[in-house]
Image (tube, helix red, strand yellow):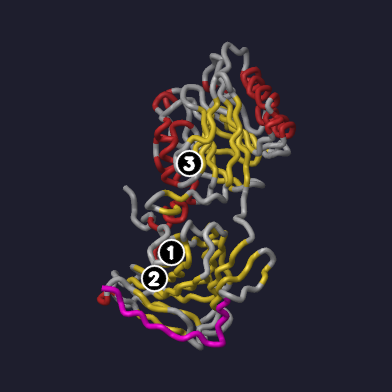
Amino acid sequence: MAMRPILWRAGAAMVFCVAMAEAEGQARVVARFADFAAGGPWEMWCPRMEIAPVFRVDAGAGRAGGSCLAIEAGPSPAAFGVWRTEVHRITPGRAYRFTAWSRTERVANPVRSVSARLDWRKADGSQARPPDYALESGAEGGWTRLQHVTTAPEGAASVRIELGLQWAPGGRVFWDDITLDELAAMPRRIVRVMTVFHRPQGTKSPAESVEQFCRLVEDAGGARPDVVCLPEGITLVGTGRSYLEASERVPVPTTRRLGELARRVNAYVCAGILEREGAVIYNTAVLVDRKGRLTGKYRKTHLPREEVEGGLTPGDAYPVFDTDFGRVGLMICWDVQFPEPARALAAQGAELLLLPIWGGSETLVKARAIENHVYLVSSSYDMKTFVVDPAGQVRAEATASEPVVVAELDLNARIIQPWLGDMKARTWKERRTDLPVP
């Protein structure tokens, strides 16, 4: 049985502008709640009275010293409740930006226990689509900003703003500065990804194999890629050499040639090589920026038996790299067999995973994209070379007849799954990162 809502009447101290919008650049303020001393159109809700937390307006605890909404869990591990209000005059298909600021005390896992959601509603009160979660997007003065940008679903007439606390015995959360803006358009962040399906045969040296890949990309340079993904072991394939014989020190000589390629096509370039450091040989993926500089490298963490017996050593870190279009993570071949590498990269904010791979399971490649809600680009010899979106759909595929393809991706696009909603935010809110995994 739902808790009986307690409503306050709106007061002069709170700005609530639905009919009367103010301009903020290209944004129109739809609703803003900043000081709760005089009350407002908020109600308290929880699914069962016996697990209701304590709700209150806390004077002097707000970001600027004013009042704010507060929820205190008490001793029960089951305590769960939300402050909520409903904003009307929503236009389907329009872009909206929701922002809320929270501060916690004695909450062990704020990502799991603190939630800010948008629940879109039709004119008849039914749900237009599953709720959207706002994720952490910054911090200031002990307060955390949660933000979400999305498009109002078809049929939406209003949206419920829900600010909650759950499963945090002894903890409490404060809410302030809650805003809903209508944007002129959904912001886009376009990246053009290029991938290559090619297998050199009978080359005389690593340099010759590398050159074949570079010429393919240079010949397709008019496609204007932002990032190019080449396969695993481009210094090994086709040469007939051993891991040791194909290995080299980084950053030269292969990264120098990849740097020339990157400058010529004005794109980031990722490729797999064999890296030697003293007596140690790694299966490594390098990332070179548009100016030909080595941005970083990733050493394959999961080695198959064949590579172990060939004398390779695994890496022990999952670095991510900031580019001028977004955050990128690198994986190599056998890594895709296991969930941990992709999860570790996505958990650090990687939006695009580049996968130089010899061959493997196409199903698992799609699974890694789906379960982490990221784009994934593979470049291979013995499996499909393709670009997969967060829903597991193939956006482009390179083949023997078309060895170089480009896909245009919008990293800001919201992929809404039927019955589930926007899984990018939902995945990270509902995943149990607090539980140890054996």
Comes first in the chain, label 1 or label 3 = 1
Is residue 15 highlighted in magenta? yes
* Disc ID at residue 122: 1
* Residue contact at pointers 3 and 2, CB within 8 angstroms: no
Mark 3 — residue?
Answer: 316
Q: CA distance from mark 2 to mark 1?
A: 26 Å
Q: Which mark is residue 252?
A: none
Amino acid on which the number 1 mark rests in the picture? Lys
Q: Which residue is mark 2?
A: 165
Q: Main secondary structure of the magenta part?
A: loop
Which residue is drawn at the image coordinates 35% and 79% (left, top)?
5
- The nearer-to-camera label among 1 and 3 is 1
Question: Is residue 269 left or right of 351 when viewed as pictured?
Answer: right
Residue 332 is at least partly visible in this image: yes
Point out the tag, 3 or 2, that comes first from the N-terminus: 2
Front residue of 132 and 72: 132
| Mark 1 vs mark 3, CA separation in Å | 50 Å
Check disc 2 and report its element: helix, strand or loop.
strand
Residue under the point 41% across and 30% down: 361
- In what quadrant of the picture does the N terminus appear? bottom left
Residue closest to the eye, 154 or 231: 154
